[in-house]
Amino acid sequence: MAQVRTAFFFRGGKYVRYEIDPVTGAETVNHDFYPRGVAEAWSAMPASFTQGIDAVVNWPDGFVYFFKGSEYVRWDATNDTVDASFYPHDTASQWPALPASFAAGMNAAINWGDGRVFFFKGPKYVRYDLQTDSVDQTIYPRDISEGWPDFPVAFRSGVDAAVNWGNGTAYFFKGGQYLNYDIQNEKVRPGYPLPITEPGKWPELVQAGFTGPIDEVIEWPQADVVSVDIPGRLVSCSKRTQPEVRCGGEFEMHALFADADPSIPACGEYRQYIRGELEVNGQPVRFITKEHGVPAPRLMRSRPGQSSDDDHFIEDGQAASSPANPFHVDLDYGHRDAAVGNGNLNDMYLVKRRSGEQYAGRDTPGGVGAPGTFFKIDVDFRGHLIDVCNGGRVLFTREWTVNCQVP
Amino acid sequence: MNDETPRLAGDFWVYPSLHEVTGTSVRVNVAIAVEQPLDLQDSDVAVELVAGGQSLSVAEAPVPGPLPAIQMTGANAYALYRFDNPDGLALESVTVTVRGGSATFDVSLPVG
């Protein structure tokens, strides 16, 4: 289920979007669009960060950090927003683990994919522990020449940009040259450095005019699905008539998202949609639902006619309107930013709502009424797993029906 | 109904749908968004159907007790009414009241 990976190369006020096919390794750039101005496309980016970014690094919770001079910006990759009331912000005050010389400015950063992030500044680097949010300041800052002994001389004095390519390779850029680094064996592959313009190596960058120096590169976070069980344990009709009438179905939703940078669990979310027909005591009735982010509730729609282009599915949700609502917030499936967090046991990301790799949901659609109540439930469900860090790209889809009638 | 937009009646989103509009009676099936099934009793809800400038009389109303409900992510309770309209008066509005809060819907256009 691997998806196309995306990397962004920044230089000056421009950037290039690089797409990597995970199967063939083919790398492409749409040269009709790129290079493009950062200010033009990254609309949430503060103006001072649309030119000359120093370092960029992704974090396991779906945030991407941009550094420039002594300031940084936290970009939320799950919804492409920046809290403009707080960012840009002084790096030193918010990154206490970074040595002061690095907080004052750095050249490059790279998420190593194993719980470590490396920051580079001039001939020095630091190793940042993601688990403990700490840097061992008894060791770091350390000379690149000590920690990366097989770096060529030109790279020991500093690097311009670094990126984890997600396939066991990291690339380091300096001026018009680059290194191909074998992460597992911790060494520069033979034959490097090479010029970016070396035939057959970075033809898309060359065509885009990005032949160096490059300010920074980031492999963009994305969702990848490891396993899915949706709908799990599906019962399409279960009914009883005493002590009250119950008529409906039940199912569970389980998904596991990959946690191996740049596959970030925070980028993976579940969505559920409904359409269909309902009757109570022989009368057709409508159902008021609430789509996430839509101000007003709306009505579930019937199945469309065969010639319709509109599938009539709308999101399955509930408005925070009733005083009986124990959460007092809108409820819907799979949105990590739900105000109720993991307080709704039928809709949880484990262990943490924002960054958990497991999704576990449960639904029991159906009717409940006093003895003698008639119900007819005939509802289609659609479950999606989507990548919210990449425009809501659908990673998985499945449809099923709950069809139940009593008596 | 002029549109298919639920409205707030006090704290509750509601939507009345009209059915079996004949020359002598009209059914009004009211959906009320609630958090849990069986939240609402029949006595929590009232519906007024106005036609030809007058309130039509209720011929059928929910039986006493908790209203039947259907649950998806949340739940809707249902209050089902039938109103007499022996003179075939032109329908004008439906007002739904839930625990004191009301919402009025224009039903003067033909039922879609």
Image: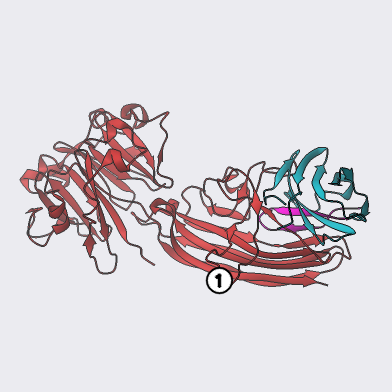
Q: Amino acid at mark 1?
A: Ser
| Start-end of magenta stretch | B65-83
Q: Give the quadrant of residue B100.
A: top right
Q: Disc 1 on helix, strand or loop?
A: loop
Instruction: Find out whether residue B68 is within the magenta segment.
Output: yes
Q: Nearer the viewer, residue A169 or A54?
A: A54
User: Which one of the lettered chains is coloured red?
Assistant: A
Quarter containing the C terminus of chain B: bottom right
- Residue B2 appears in view: yes
Identify the colour of chain B in the image: cyan
Q: How is the image coloured?
A: by chain
The residue where tag 1 is placed is A307
Tell me residue A87's x, y (percent): 37, 31
The chain to which mark 1 is attached is: A
Give how far across and how far down residue B37 sits, in percent: 77, 54
Between A286 and A9, the one lying in front of the other is: A286
Residue A15 on image: x %, y %? 23, 45
Residue at point 82% right, 42% down? B97
Is A46 placed left or right of A284 in the picture? Answer: left
Inspect this view and state whether residue A137 appears: no
Can you give x and y, in whole percent of width and height, for residue A296 in the image?
Answer: 63, 45
